[in-house]
Amino acid sequence: MKPKTSKPKFLLIGWDAADWKIINPLLDKGWMPNLEKFINEGVISNLATLDPPYSPMLWTSIATGKRPYQHGVLGFHEPWDKGSGIRPVMSTTRKCKAVWNMLMQEGYKSHVVGWWPSHPAEPINGIAISDYFQNTAGKMYEPWPLAEGSVFPKELEAHFAKLRVHPEELTGQHILPFVPGAERVNQEQDKRLSAIANETAKAATLHASFTNIIRTQEWDFAALYLATIDHYCHGFMRYHPPKRPHIKQADYDLFHNVVTAGYRFHDLMLGRLLELAGEETNVMLVSDHGFQPDHLRPRNIPKEPAGPAYEHSPYGIFVMKGPDIKKDEIIYGASLLDVTPTILNCFDLPIGEDMDGKVLTQIFEKTPDVAAIESWENRPGECGMHPADKAEDEDMAARALEQLVELGYIEKPGDNAEKNRKKAHDECQFNLARAYINGGKTAEAIPILEKLYEENPDTARYAFRLATCYQMIGELKKCRQVIEALREKEFYDEATLNVMEGSLLLGERQPIKAIKLFKKAEGKVSAFHARLNLQIARGYTMLQRWKDAERALLQEIELDYDHAAAHELLGMTYLRDGQFEKAADALLRAIGLEYESPNAHFQLGEALTALGEYEQAANAFEVCLMMQPLANMARQRLVELYQTQLGQPDKAADFAEAFDQSILGTITVVSGLPRSGTSMAMQMLEKGGMEIFTDKERQADNSNPRGYYEHEAVKTLARNRKWLGEAVGKAVKVIANLLPHLPPRYRYRVIFMERDLHEVLASQRKMLNRMGKKTKDEVYPLRLIQEYERQLKKTKQWASRQPNVEILFVQHRATIEQPFEQALRINGFLEHELLPELMVQAVDSSLYREKTATKKEEVAETM
């Protein structure tokens, strides 16, 4: 064990489900004075949660800095080869070190009380009290044995057992602050007062034990977790003001103060903790998620595993103070994954490169250095973790399961242990898939969901999530197959399926149809959970109907002001509509809610550039780059700003060099309008020796007897660019209006086919006729020609501004009439990689069937 360095002590306090929406009104009334003093002496923030928002998973992420697919805790319970076949998740479920294990290896003494999950208590170099310790069994005067393994060291069991508070010890004076009219409750029939007493006693037990430890023991790090706010809220938030119509007046009158009293109780406990910690200690207060206190409270809880989590909100709280911490400031961008890296930094210890979180450097008066090692898992020495195969007490596991059932987090296990194991396994796998999706690893989630769907075809949740994943990666056909299967089995009502299909239609770039389906679902599904207004707004932005999009987004924000994605899209909508000040304001609100959004920072940079705020714009683009190092479009903007607006050519040169160095590879792109000769150009490249990126899904036909040389993934370019890596070193066909969606992380050599627009239209019309799709008019609409001209002009302007794009314009007629000359031009453009003699074999003049344009006098405008 290494000798420790002298650093301030660190106190970590966890309040499950604490939410600023509830806290702020109480602060305004002066009802949480200890928290208010704490806030004034330090920094505060929202704390972004993870999905799924299940407490054992989240608190383990807080303690490790890692997502669930790394730490291994995947729900409330897990399969077990004993008893009922399942057990609650344990400290042995965790596959990696928690922060107290890391600190122990560095010689720092840690105490941990009540963490979820932490049973059996780990043999660390301080005192560990597990999450089984506070559970009660039986009447007050009956034997109350401690759960085996709930206290370490074991010789302290008797000492801490005496500090426990039994619910029956609480008197009316303890309960009346929660329920002033408690005398009106028939406690023989109504167990709600007992529930309040039970949760309050548990909190008092843990608080008494923890304060005893930090008052009497030496310590460097101490952590206390209290689940009580979450339990108060699940039991009594339905009665919290304002009263909702479906709540009985008598119940409201009795229990409307429970949640408020619960927070005030926690403020009292916080005051004592701060007093014992002293001014020279770093103190951090966090919650793993929030709890909806307002109109977003669901009226009904879904009948599915962990259904009560629908009451959670996506932001917890973060407060921290200490000798080197800023005072009375708000910070942005904090995630629960950042807690452990920040604690390690406070002890001058490195973070693990395998951690998913970061150090919150912005909380410090002086920005600290951040050191890193490959992984704390490779650090040798005793760390106080149990072996994974440590034996567990079946009776205690069964009692802990009963509590999870009472809270609604799991179903009551049946008598068939094997069936219980299978259900628990499937639920853990489903949670693992959700964690992968939340961590940006959709590809890892899909095989898990496919297997779950195959084995459980009647579980709609699995199908819905799989369909969403298919849409995310551009597998729209597979997505539609799953949705159609759901329709056939009638798992969901029509309105819910309309929302699902509408989302798919947006992915298929069919916004008009999508909006119609969303409108049909209005009033029939929860606008909050379905994000109906946001979906409608996305459709309108595709149609460039900015005012309609703005109206829908303002409705979404009125429904849920804390929805970062709505503010971000509103900012982008204002930006496209030329309302730059409003755009900047909306994007700043989005960033305040969800700082870790590279796109929001990029769009903010665009808005600030338009406003002439060039230095702030450059800062926004640089933040975008820090978050997304491959964001070459941000580098491009920085080159332009530093070169032309800020007068810093050296910086511009640095970003230009970084732009070139970050290019991932070269892709040859064949583009143009439909029927402009792009298939012929692809055939020439293939004949000349270039590999083609095609899936051969679209078969040859009379219009293109030699094939189309397309790939379905290209159609999803506007929202899915993951496939581009597969096209490096190959030629890919991309229609002209999709070119601006090519990300600037690759070098593109674009061969752009040009053809007389009258010939293009004539060829398109003949093709539609061959397909049996008769056109309505005998003449070509002038507006279509004008639209094509606009597209071509826009594409050429785009190409001229991209430092990573080279473009060669090739005339269709010239290629037919002078194939070898054009083959030489193309080969020269492609750095002589091909064989022109073979390229010309792809040119077949007999397929040049619409040789002359329709006479211009036949062109008429159709309205």
Image (cartoon, helix red, strand yellow):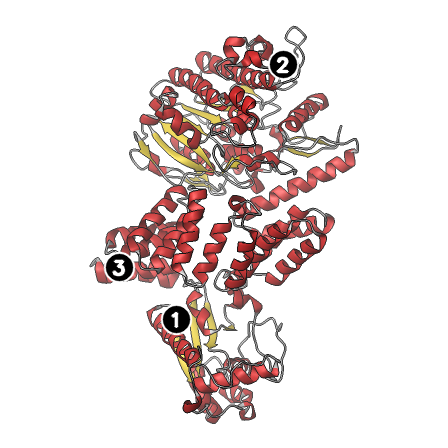
Residue 489 on image: x %, y %: 72, 52
User: What's the amino acid at mark 3?
Assistant: Leu
Q: Distance of mark 2 from mark 1, alpha carbons?
A: 76 Å
Callout 3: SS = helix
Q: Earlier in the sequence, mark 2 or mark 1?
A: 2
> Residue drawn 36% across and 49% down?
587
Q: Residue at x 40, y 15 (%)?
A: 276
Real-space Cα separation, disc 2 to disc 3, in angstroms: 71 Å
Q: Quadrant of residue 429?
A: top right
Q: Nearer the viewer, residue 206 or 766?
A: 766
Q: At label 1, which amino acid type do we have? A: Val
Q: Are marks 2 and 1 in contact (CB under 8 Å)?
A: no
Tag nearer the camera, 2 or 1: 2
Mark 2: secondary structure = loop
Q: Residue 66 bears which disc, if any?
A: none
Asked if 71 appears above or below 485 in the picture, the reply is above
Q: Identify the amino acid type marked 2.
A: Gln
SS at mark 1 in the image: strand
Q: Is residue 452 above or below residue 863?
A: above
Relative side of 558 to 635, left or right: right
Residue 641: mark in rendering: 3
Labels 3 & 1 near each other (Cβ < 8 A): no
x, y percent for residue 278: 36, 17
Q: Residue beneath label 1, please?
A: 805
Instruction: State whether residue 76 is above or below residue 718.
Output: above
Q: As displayed, is residue 14 above or below residue 486?
A: above
Which of the two labelled residues, at mark 3 and mark 1, occupies the earlier sequence position? 3
Q: Which residue is mark 2?
A: 187
- In the displayed structure image, the side of residue 115 where residue 451 appears, left or right: right
Q: CA distance from mark 3 to mark 1?
A: 20 Å
